[in-house]
Image (cartoon, coloured by chain):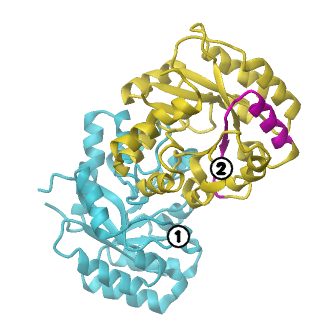
Chain colours: A cyan, B yellow
Amino acid sequence: MNPGIVDWHVSYGFSPRQRVDASRERVEKLLAAHGVGIALMHHLEGLWYDPLSGNEALLTAFAGTPHVPVCTVNPLEGEERCRRAFAAACDRGARFWRLYPKEQGWDMGHPVAALILDLLREGRCCLLMDSDAKGIQAALDLARDEVPVVGSLHFYDSADWSLRLRPYRSFYPTTRLLHGPGTLRETARIFGDRLLFASGAPFGAVASSLALLDEVGEAVRERTLRGNARELLGRFGHGD
Amino acid sequence: MVIDVHGHLGRWSFPMDDPGPEDLTAMMDRLGIDRCILSSSRALRYDLEGGNRELSGSLRSGGRLFGYITANLHYPEESIAGIGVLEGERKDTGQARFVGVKIHPMIQNRRFDTPAGFRVARRAHESGLPILIHTFGSPMETPRQVLPVLREIPDLRIILAHAGGFDWHLAADMAAAGENLYAEICSSCTSPDKLLQLIEAFGDRRVLFGTDATLFHPGYALGMVRDADLPAESLSRLMGENALDLFRFQP
């Protein structure tokens, strides 16, 4: 069993919009310094340039490592390219996907987004997506609450999302933006068995997200850092 | 000595804890923060005079919590009068309760590079008080709005709160604008690269540690510092020495 922390939001590659060293070596060093043993890793090439080549590079780079590659498609590229990128990654075993509506400038009303959600549901995949609460709700609705959706939502909007997303059993919030005093504790109370640890490294500090966990007791901390994640990963064949 | 130069007391419109002064000092104890300089959220968001007065009461005793006098650029007369009254207030230890002036263009919907901003800046300068100004990437929050004021009053000490937030390059690009311009590091963006690049641009004597407590959990900014893995000398300047000099605190 990998005893490490599971981090649900880690990037690597080249960062074109902020000068950040997102090289694989640097990112793995940051993770290792804090005992992160499993990272849900996405490639910035897929986000900013080419999902197909980004996914291929990602799947090759992390094959045989404890980290979990998170592939992507971009609805703005249209139905055919999305289908092709999805099929290519699925053929190599990809089950975890990330969408970037905010960064790429589209929303869940985009017709290709609906198609992607169908593909994810039919392929029994897991979706990671940072969006506002309405965007995550739309993804959950499109997937009929059958695709687990892991999302980092800002505590500024927690009045909205904590109520809006509570009924969805497939919604998994992360700790990444719960830095208002008491907001992680409250999220753990509401979504306890689904709260997942995420840092956003290297765009966020792993130590920052870890610091927030001093609001909860040891049992919740352990569940958030490892237990809830292992349960979800296990559903997709990333078990111990 | 760890000094948090960016804190608040008062209420925020989010479903979160509302830490009071005792809660804040307990958090500081837990995290190893010795002093915190605060502004009143009531003064920032609503009632300038009432908020500053309320904060003054919370600063009366002890040697750990200090204040910024909030200015509201829609009310320059009142802001200037507030500086006149509050700058002389002392703690029961004899130290000044207020050690700077706070300006928040976004919350108050008015930029600093306006006639009102210049007036408040001149008054702060007259009293030797540094100004902490909220900055992010939008036109209302841009760090660049301090440049006209700095050109007129080059020895006014100005701290760019959040250092532009996610757009820290905006702050870093201005580092050469004057030796009295400082960057403060906290925001929802905790990339260690932000801190490293600010130190690269400003040098390690003009970057300051802040947390945004009690709006943010103070451990969030501490985590950013930890992951930046700074050399010991730079770390001790960031965490306290620079603030000791800037605010003319006794160690």
Q: Is residue A146 left or right of residue B187?
A: left
Which chain is indicated by disc 1?
Answer: A
Identified at 34% across, 81% down, the residue is A55
Which chain is indicated by disc 2?
Answer: B
**Please, what is the three-letter code of the amino acid marked with disc 1?**
Arg
- Give the tally of numbered discs: 2
**Please, what is the three-letter code of the amino acid marked with disc 2?**
Gly
Q: Secondary structure at mark 2?
A: loop
The N terminus of chain B is located in which quarter? top left
Identified at 62% across, 35% down, the residue is B12
Q: Is residue A85 above or below residue B106?
A: below
Q: Nearer the viewer, residue B52 or A154?
A: B52
Return the residue at label 1. Answer: A17
Using the numbered discs, state the Cα–Cα distance from disc 1 to disc 2 in whole angstroms: 27 Å
Q: Estimate how packed mark 1 is, as few (under 14), some (14 to 19) or many (20 or more) residues with alpha carbons within 10 Å.
A: few
Identified at 56% across, 8% down, the residue is B93
